[in-house]
Image (cartoon, helix red, strand yellow):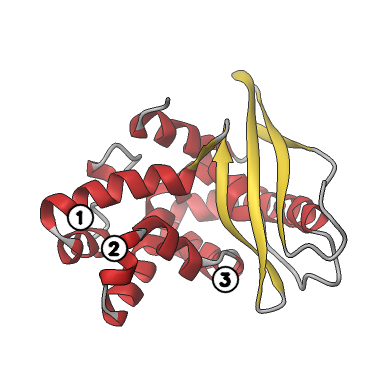
Amino acid sequence: MKTPRTMSRLIVPLFALMLGAQAQAAPEKPADEVIRSATTEFQTLIRENHEAYRKDLGAFYEVVDEKVVPYFDTRGIAQLVLGRNWRKASEEQRNRFEAAFKDSLIRTYARAMLDYHDSVEAQWAPLRAAKGAEDVTVDAKILRKDGPPIALAFSVHVRDDQWKIYDIAVENLSLITNFRSQINAEIRASGLDAVIERLEKNTYFSSSGGVG
């Protein structure tokens, strides 16, 4: 079983693909086609603006936030990460956690997208899903120049007539499960408000085994 620190290292080369998986209306395209085409488009955007983004990370964060994040089910992800603590949380705490978790991830891992944009590519497996299914898994392998392939699985469901990602498994280990284990241990130790405050200050992942 992988430790949180090992998982953090795996996330780094995958983040460009993870954030590149934008979604479109479910009836128009199958989930795997959406992820493939959007990943290519976003990697092209990074390649064409690589130096400008390196000089202005703030602008890059804004691009990611505007063009990519809306296609993730951030509400659903926040609920899955908090687990039973979601039910105990107030609506204000839920909203703050959702926003802070998203922003902290962007700021922690966006730099990796620039570092690895030209050193990884995805090999996509055929989609196996029943016709009309609204919750599917898109399988792929990450091909790296400096290591063996990494198995990757996007969990995607329909929300607001769009395919949206709500989890990613790396070598059969769920990122949501990994984050839930870390964050809920912190909540038990110091409380939800303290964890939210650390996220809002962008200090959580850098001091919890993530890549800061």
Check disc 1 and report the residue beneath it. Answer: 187
Q: Which mark is residue 70?
A: 3
- Quadrant for the N terminus in the image: top left
Hey, what amino acid is under mark 1? Ile
30 left or right of 46 in image: right
Q: Position of residue 12 (x, y in %)?
A: 48, 38
Q: Few, some or many C-alpha atoms within 10 Å of disc 3 (few <14, some 14-19, many ≥20)?
A: few
Q: Which mark is residue 100?
A: none
Of callouts 1 and 3, which one flags the residue occurring earlier in the amino acid sequence?
Answer: 3
150 left or right of 93 in image: right
> Which residue corresponds to the image point at 17% horizontal and 66% vertical from the top-left?
193
Of callouts 1 and 2, which one flags the residue occurring earlier in the amino acid sequence?
Answer: 2
- Farthest residue, direction top: 147
Does dot 1 land on a helix, a strand or a loop? helix
Of badges 2 and 3, nearer the viewer stands: 2
Q: Few, some or many C-alpha atoms within 10 Å of disc 1 (few <14, some 14-19, many ≥20)?
A: some
> Which residue corresponds to the image point at 36% horizontal and 29% vertical from the top-left?
3
Does dot 3 land on a helix, a strand or a loop? helix
Of callouts 2 and 3, which one flags the residue occurring earlier in the amino acid sequence?
Answer: 3
Query: Along the line of sight, which residue is nearer the eye, 29 or 145?
Result: 29
Query: Along the line of sight, which residue is nearer the eye, 208 or 178?
Result: 178
Query: Along the line of sight, which residue is nearer the eye, 74 or 203?
Result: 74
Check disc 2 and report the residue beneath it. Answer: 85
> Which residue corresponds to the image point at 77% horizontal and 58% vertical from the top-left?
31
- Farthest residue, direction left: 190
Hey, what amino acid is under mark 2? Asn
Does dot 2 land on a helix, a strand or a loop? helix
Q: Are marks 1 and 2 in contact (CB under 8 Å)?
A: yes
Q: Can I make out residue 118 in this image?
A: no
Hey, what amino acid is under mark 3? Pro
204 left or right of 77 in image: left
